Image (spheres, helix red, strand yellow):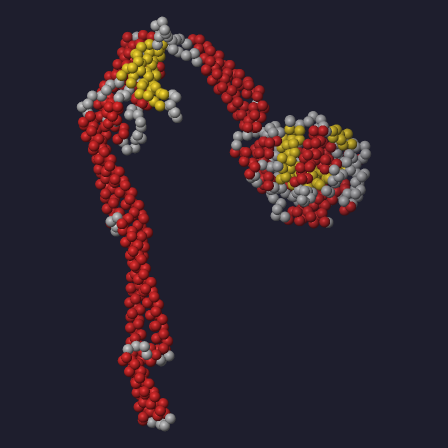
Amino acid sequence: MEDQKDYREFLSKDSVTLPPSFTTNSQDNNEEQLDIGWVFSVLRRRAAIIIFIAIIIIGSLGTAIILLGRRKAPLYQGYFKLLAEPISAEAQVDRLAISSETLAKNVHFKKDTIDYDSLVRFLKSEQIMRPIIEEMNSKNDYIAYDIVIKNLYITRIMVEDAKPVPIGTKIIDVHYNDENSDRVEFLINKLSLAYLEYSGYERLVTVKNGIKFIEEQLPGLEERANNIKKQIQDVRQRYNVIDPELNTPGLYRQKQLLEEKRLNLETKIANIKVVKANIEKHLDEGNATTVLADRTSAYKILIEQLNNVEGRIAQKSSLLREDSPMIRTLRQQEANLRSLLFAEAQKIMKNIDAELEGLEEEYKVIVTAENILEQQLQELPIAARLYSELQTELKVVNQTLNEFRAKREDFNLKAAQQEVPWNIIEGPGLRRDASGNLKPVGKDNTKRMLALIVVLGSLLSMGSGFLIEVIIQVFHTPKEIQVTTKLSLLGVIPLAKELRRQTIQAKPQKHLMVLGSLSSKVTNFSNLVDTDSKLKLTYSPLVLEAFRSLYTNISLLNHDSSLKSLAISSAMKGDGKSTIAINLAQIAASVGQRVLLVDANLRSPQIHLQLGLPNLEGFSDAISTDIGLNDAIQRSPENENLFILTAGQVPPDPIKLLSSQKRKYLMDQFNAFFDLVIYDTPPLVDLADASLITAHVDGTILVVAIEKTDRSMLTKAIEGLKISDASVLGVVTNFNKR
């Protein structure tokens, strides 16, 4: 009963959720980095296909390169070098003065006065090249325009050893390669003359372009300056300020004065309200004399008269009756004086109300003025920013206008001056050796191309290997499984031929012996199996140690609490979960635990086949019928602590059977009668059977087969376990080849 109570308490705990292995661990950040070990493992696995593809690519392309290299005709090169910019300081100043590119606002200023990239493209343009090529074709064999352009090289000579980056010189190198030396000589001479002719009028074109550019820019700049001035005027009118920076101190002084006035008025209003309250109190009590006591001397005379009358009344009251003529007269005088005093007090009250109303109106005016001033102060930073930006922009525009106007005058002055033309400093001519003979210049690139092909072929073959690795969605190493699932790796079971079944079948009826009452916690199981039946599994030391390590790791997972039940499952069929369950049960039984191995795979049971046990009655029969557990549970002849409950007859609807309350009751009974219950479940993917079992055990272990289990199936299985709120302890890799 205590075991059943513990079982119910275990199921009721909110903490029975997925273990931390389902959560992201900070130590798993190696997913974001390239796993070098994985790369090398892929190269080892796919070495054969990589080498095969590399041989095909390198062999075919290398052969083609060698054959093409032997057929290649010699090339001759014509060349010349020209100085594109003047070197003297005076010429440099003139060049800078007429450089129109420096005028554009959005153009970056460069040290070079010539855009060499654009110049090189222009020198190879159709405008210069086509007339020369047409003339050359009329005197030599025809050659296409595109081929000439392809073989013409125009580059700027660079100072390669300059730091930190190479510096460009003012020299342009021009050379042309062709198999026909006459064509090379003709073209290179014509090009040198054409380039010098171009340099003759390049300066004039530059000056005219500069003047044209300025004339185009001036109207826009002037209009822009006028627009900015208008915007400045709008800011002044909108915010009622001339200069926000100058107006700020005055506005803050006004704010301070208004605040002082408001505070004074608040004090006055408060005092008057106190006086008014006192007067109202005295008037309500009919005591007008107190109200008028502190007023003018005229009120004091009335108060003295009232006091005299009251004194006389007091004197006469002791001598005369109340209805005597004298007493009546004195009472009438007293009433008249009191009425007069009350009327005067009412006048004072009205004066106080008028004064209070005036102060409150003044207070409202001041508060309104403060609000308006506060709004102006809040808008003042915006006005100041707009005003400052517009002033800065206006300053820049005016400065640009002045510079453009000055530059226009300078251009008009420079327009008549003569530009220094480009100079040919070397050539034109053809490359020759020391003897004066034409020297072929074509480099033998065969070796370099072969080296490139080797590198390219290697990369392509390795890429093919990795592509195959990605297409084949299986796991190759336990580490891959651990990284993919983010679950604890509980055990690595090697692929061993010696891990085999050695089962001697016996007659089924001899295996079904009568058991004692289960309430005695299975104390009379000794005669459960016939001694003629033998169950024996042989192991190598490596395999045996792997299962022992698995059992140890599982035990250490729950060292603080008892682990009563386990579900052994897998994503796919054939991953070896039944073998894992059998051997894990045997290891647990060998250390003294009473272990029950339950075949919960009601669709395709395997336990009885691997152990050579009869399957006449089992788990399904215990759920669907009233059969006693002592008639279904069998005991291992090899280990008295190991008990097996086969699947039994295959039911028509396993889901309905596993969803019953009887199944839950039986699982509770198993937990109470045995130290450890191990369930061999069906595969997780596409079947709900396993989820019904894993949701009611203390922990689930996933079996993943190396080189077999599909990655997507495993991911789908883990998602299903998350949905069923199963407690996954970790994974066990099977069929490991190392």
Q: Is 353 placed above or below 677 here?
A: below
**Extreme residue toward the front, this view:** 89
**Between 314 and 219, the one nearer to me in the picture:** 314
Q: Quadrant of the C terminus?
A: top right
User: In the figure, is residue 332 to the left or right of 639?
Assistant: left
**Between 108 and 665, the one nearer to me in the picture:** 108
**Between 315 and 238, the one nearer to me in the picture:** 315
Q: Residue at x 63, y 35 (%)?
A: 489
Q: Residue at x 65, y 40 (%)?
A: 557
User: In the figure, is residue 1 to the left or right of 368?
Assistant: right
User: In the figure, is residue 367 to the left or right of 553?
Assistant: left
Q: Is 232 placed above or below 66 here?
A: below
Q: Residue at x 75, y 43 (%)?
A: 628
Residue 483 image point, x, y percent = 57, 34
Instruction: State whether residue 650 appears in this view.
Output: no
Residue 158 image point, x, y percent = 35, 20
Residue 403 image point, x, y percent = 23, 33
Q: Residue at x 61, y 31 (%)?
A: 478
Residue 514 image point, x, y percent = 80, 41
Total marks shown come to 0
Q: Which of the 4 image quadrants contains residue 707?
A: top right
Q: Is 318 placed above or below 138 here?
A: below
Instruction: State whether residue 159 appears in this view.
Output: yes
Q: Which of the 4 image quadrants contains residue 410?
A: top left
**Between 547 and 428, the one nearer to me in the picture:** 428
Q: Which of the 4 image quadrants contains residue 696?
A: top right
